[in-house]
Amino acid sequence: MKTLPFFSRGKVVRGFGRGSKELGIPTANFPDSVVERLPADISTGVYFGWASVGAGEVHKMVMSIGWNPFYKNTKKSMEVHLIHKFKEDFYGKVLNVLILGYIRPERSFNSLESLVTAIHSDIEEAKRRLDSHECRKLRDDFFIPTTDHILNGH
């Protein structure tokens, strides 16, 4: 994918509510307007990178882009799991993500348990890849300015 790394930003919206409740893996969802602006060469699947809420601390993340075939969604989504425990939700806050790489294509699963196992495997793969010097350097280079600084064009 020629467009990686790719930066995306948008306000967190409510999704289907499955991440926390059904899967035990909370996700932050981007609005349709952000999903529609993805470059054409970013295919559906699971990605890894860095994310921050507003100008807050930068965390490792894993992201699903696609139709979530297990749930047979009719709308394409971008669901981000920040690899960090937050004390409260952040609906309506600005989420910044730097997508660095691709883990695997999206696929359906035979059971909820196999889906959860795959997501945990994706999280471990993201952690491993993000520990590389190259990925840490991209985080540091990209997230130094505060969100306000970026939004004001300085």
Image (cartoon, rainbow, N blue to C red):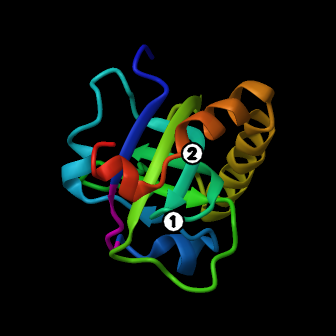
Taking 78 as reference, is 15 above or below it?
A: below
Q: Which mark is residue 144?
A: 2
Quick one: which residue is furthest to the front in this view? 154
The overriding secondary structure of the stretch rendered in magenta is loop
Q: For the C terminus, which image quadrant?
A: top left
Q: Are marks 2 and 1 in contact (CB under 8 Å)?
A: no
Front tag of 2 and 1: 2
Element type at mark 1: loop
In the image, 99 versus 112, the foreground residue is 99
Residue 109: x and y in percent read: 56, 49
Q: Which residues are magenta?
A: 10-14
**Around disc 1, counting alpha carbons within 10 Å, would you say few (fewer than 14), some (14 to 19), or many (20 or more)?**
many
Residue 12: x and y in percent read: 36, 67
Residue 98: x and y in percent read: 50, 40
Q: For the N terminus, which image quadrant?
A: top left
Q: Is residue 110 magenta?
A: no
Whole-number angstrom distance, CA of label 2 to CA of label 1: 24 Å
In the image, 87 versus 35, the foreground residue is 87
Q: In the picture provided, is 24 more to the left or to the right than 107?
A: right
Taking 74 as reference, is 42 above or below it?
A: above
Q: At 75% across and 47% down in the image, what residue appears?
A: 121
In the image, 48 versus 147, the foreground residue is 147
Q: At 49% across and 47% down in the image, what residue appears?
A: 145
Q: Amino acid at mark 1?
A: Thr
Q: At 59% across and 48% down in the image, what residue appears?
A: 62
Q: Amino acid at mark 2?
A: Ile
Residue 137: x and y in percent read: 69, 31
Residue where numbered disc 1 is placed: 27
